[in-house]
């Protein structure tokens, strides 16, 4: 259940209790963190749609695209070439890399963005909306010692780690959206 006022969601019932959404303020913080307001809006809408459908995802915007090599393996990059021939009946996502290679998120329909964001792993892009990877498995150290209060699961750990290189929106399958920056949570909605 959700409650709206003046066309904006202000409360939602989640996990057996009412929560203040404060979507306007949370969007403002997200938008200010990016230097690209169109990208901020597109990713925020994507996150809201995924949360509404109870689909998890991790959207990462890197400050510097060159940092991608510190976060994921080269085989997850869209610029990588697919493996020659997977075993029969075993398709791999890298066979679809050519479809999204050199694409900008701002030029993709939201439905396509939502579809690739649902794939296990992270959707990674730069601040100019260039899509670098989707379904990417992040490489990061064990964060339990650094942030024991923040560790909820694999996606939360990945969001904390990825946010050291930029900003991350984590969408939980329970409908919660979290924003991370500089290795710390900024807000939950």
Image: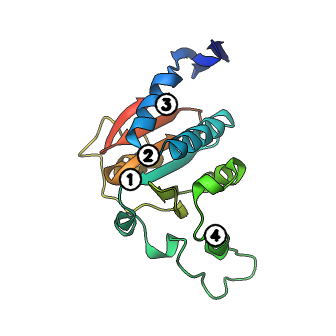
Q: Residue at x 54, y 44 (%)?
A: 38
Q: Of marks 1 and 4, which one's residue comes earlier in the chain?
A: 4
| Res. 27 mark | 3
Above or below residue 23? Residue 58 is below
Q: Is residue 5 above or below residue 23?
A: above
Q: Residue at x 24, y 46 (%)?
A: 145
- Marks 4, 2: nearer the viewer: 2
User: What residue does disc 1 label?
Assistant: 162
Q: Which residue is mark 4?
A: 93
Q: CA distance from mark 3 to mark 4?
A: 31 Å
Question: How much space separates mark 1 and mark 4, taking CA atoms?
Answer: 21 Å
Q: Whole-Å distance between the Cαs marked 4 and 2?
A: 22 Å
Kindly check if marks 1 and 4 are in contact, taking CB atoms under 8 A apart as contact.
no
Q: Earlier in the sequence, mark 3 or mark 4?
A: 3
* Badge number at residue 168: 2
Q: Nearer the viewer, mark 3 or mark 1?
A: 3
What secondary structure is marked by label 1? helix
16 and 5: which is toward the camera: 5
Between discs 1 and 2, the one toward the N terminus: 1
Q: Position of residue 132 (x, y in %)?
A: 50, 65
Query: Which residue is at 43% across, 60% downward?
Result: 138
The residue tagged with tag 3: helix, strand or loop?
helix
- Crowd band around label 1 with a 10 angstrom C-alpha radius: few (<14), some (14–19), many (20+): many
Looking at the image, can residue 188 be seen? no
The location of residue 19, given as percent across then percent down, is 52, 17
Q: Secondary structure at mark 4?
A: helix
- Which quadrant would the N terminus be assigned to in this image? top right
Q: Is residue 1 visible?
A: yes
Label 2 Cα neighbours within 10 Å, binned few <14 / some 14-19 / many ≥20: many
Measuring from the top left, give residue 122's x and y in whole percent: 51, 56
């Amino acid at each position: 259940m959700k409650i709206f006022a003046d066309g904006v969601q202000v409360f939602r019932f989640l996990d057996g209790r009412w929560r203040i959404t404060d979507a306007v303020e949370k969007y403002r913080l997200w938008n200010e963190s990016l230097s690209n307001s169109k990208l901020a809006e597109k990713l925020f809408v994507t996150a809201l749609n995924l949360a509404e459908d109870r689909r998890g995802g991790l959207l990462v915007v890197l400050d510097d695209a060159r940092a991608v090599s510190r976060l994921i393996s080269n085989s997850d990059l869209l610029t990588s070439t697919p493996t020659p021939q997977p075993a029969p009946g075993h398709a791999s996502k890298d066979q679809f890399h050519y479809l999204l290679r050199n694409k900008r998120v701002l030029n993709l329909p939201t439905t396509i963005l939502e579809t690739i964001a649902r794939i296990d792993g992270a959707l990674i892009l730069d601040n100019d909306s260039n899509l670098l990877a989707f379904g990417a498995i992040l490489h990061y150290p064990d964060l339990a010692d650094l942030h024991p209060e923040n560790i909820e699961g694999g996606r939360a750990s990945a969001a904390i780690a990825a946010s050291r290189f930029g900003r991350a929106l984590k969408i939980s399958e329970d409908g919660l959206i979290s924003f991370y920056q500089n290795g710390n949570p900024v807000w939950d909605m």
